[in-house]
Amino acid sequence: MSGKYEQRDKEVILVVDDNRITCEVIQRNLEIEKFLVFTAHSVNDAIQILSRQKIDLVITDYKMPKHSGLELIKYVRDHLQSISIIMLTGYGSINSAVSAIKEGADEYITKPFTDEELLNAVKTSLQKQKEKKTDPEMLYNDVWARFGIMGQSEKMLGVYSKIEKACSNDAIVLITGENGTGKELVARAIHYNHKARSIYPFIPVNCPGIPASLFESELFGHVKGAFTGAVEHRKGFFQAAEKGGLFLDEISELPFELQAKLLRVLQEKEIFRVGETQLKKVDVRIIAATNKNLDDLVEKGLFRQDLFFRLNVININIPPLRDRENDIILLAKHFVLKYAKEIGRTEPNFTDRAINALKNYSWPGNVRELENLIHRSLIMNDKDIIDSVDFPDIMKVKIHYNPYLDLSLEDMSKKYIRDVVQQTGGNKAKALEILKIDRKTLLKKIK
Ligand SMILES: Nc1ncnc2c1ncn2[C@@H]1O[C@H](COP(=O)(O)OP(=O)(O)OP(=O)(O)O)[C@@H](O)[C@H]1O
Ligand SMILES: [Mg+2]
């Protein structure tokens, strides 16, 4: 039997019992069968381990001081649906077995149990867990619970598997995607699910927000007296993120001369604080993001190729919302629920017309635009339905949107106005109503 298990990746089991001897006995038995086993002696310890470590199966005692095994089952079911659970109950306490199953345990074993009973229960539960993992609904619930990301589209599946990969190593990640697609959300998901770094800080840095003259001092820190105004030692972002993660947002906006300085740090993993000659080692995971096409910028000589190569180890491209049609409604309903709860009212339903309008719109501002739209609709009207009349006029026309079109603002606005006129079938009055501009401007722009 153990031969069969040697073929596969080790399954990971967490054993939770306040009795250390029980924990050790179970651990030993399962390790002989080639499982990887963690132990915890309280529910709080168990939750700590669950937040750091990928676990396939939890075996928990029922009666423990402070929090009971039932509370642990509740936690796992609320946060980590696809994990299997076996409850250990005292002899004759059928009531606790029933409540364990009711709360979502997959199996229970009554103490005392034989090694064989334990192993059988483990195998049955792991089999159930495998089935759950291939059930798409479960998979998405799990992604939401672990990453805080909504989306069931094929395209997002690719994103999830890359996040998963990024969580188990320290490679630099470059996240690309249009405005509002969820780049920061993905960066946080990677950090907070990283096996070692999640308990250390995640520091977001908005690159264009740092004045070039302060770049080194902000990133690497300075010592007292390094320059006028440096009245005390100050840690930079790199040191603040020690052992954790640094999120370099809008990396494309970093001035060319500073790109070389950043590259050096990424290569050497050492920094100089301003005013100091001694190098300091840094241990920081870098995640960078951009809504620009870095390839293009490299070609135009605006972004260093060597830095681009350094950053582009794991590339996660988040597709625009318009390319994830199935996610639009899912996200819309998610935001309705979120904001209805926040303002304390029951959530309204969408009319068919509203659903169509949501699906047909091009969402240039992606998920953020959708979230703002739903929030506004909930504040602006208190009906128990959301209809397309509640949406802004701009959503009534279907415009093909290409953010990478190389147009000036003036040309972009002309193109947009022409598109609207075309969409209204040349009905200028309708176009004026949608565009909210006067006739003279319209005629000038479509000339
Ligand atoms: N898949 C998703 N599920 C749930 N919420 C999402 C999702 N994608 C984005 N959001 C929400 O949309 C908003 C914008 O996301 P975020 O700030 O991560 O985008 P971004 O790509 O960094 O945007 P920008 O380019 O403008 O900086 C946030 O409120 C975020 O929580
Ligand atoms: Mg962002």
Image (cartoon, rainbow, N blue to C red):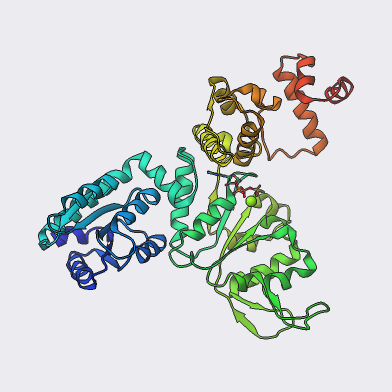
Which of the 4 image quadrants contains residue 43? bottom left
Q: How far from the left and from the top, in percent, is residue 335?
A: 55, 38
**Is residue 398 something one can see in this rendering?**
no
Tell whether 148 sits left or right of 137: right
Tell whether 300 sits left or right of 28: right
Q: Residue furthest bottom?
A: 278
**Is residue 267 something one can see in this rendering?**
yes
| Quarter placement of the C terminus | top right
| Residue name at image x 50 percent, y 55 percent | 189
Of the pair 84 and 299, the residue shown nearer to us: 84
Q: How far from the left and from the top, in percent, is residue 17?
A: 26, 66
Tell whether 324 sits left or right of 442: left
Tell whether 203 sits left or right of 113: right
Q: How far from the left and from the top, in percent, is residue 111?
A: 14, 61
| Residue name at image x 47 percent, y 53 percent | 163
Position of 62 relative to 237 (above/below): above
| Residue name at image x 64 percent, y 77 percent | 271
Of the pair 426 and 148, the residue shown nearer to us: 148
Of the pair 241 and 275, the residue shown nearer to us: 241
Count of numbered tags: 0
Position of 196 relative to 130 (above/below): below
Q: How far from the left and from the top, in percent, is residue 236?
A: 67, 72
| Quarter placement of the N terminus | bottom left
Which of the 4 image quadrants contains residue 220? bottom right
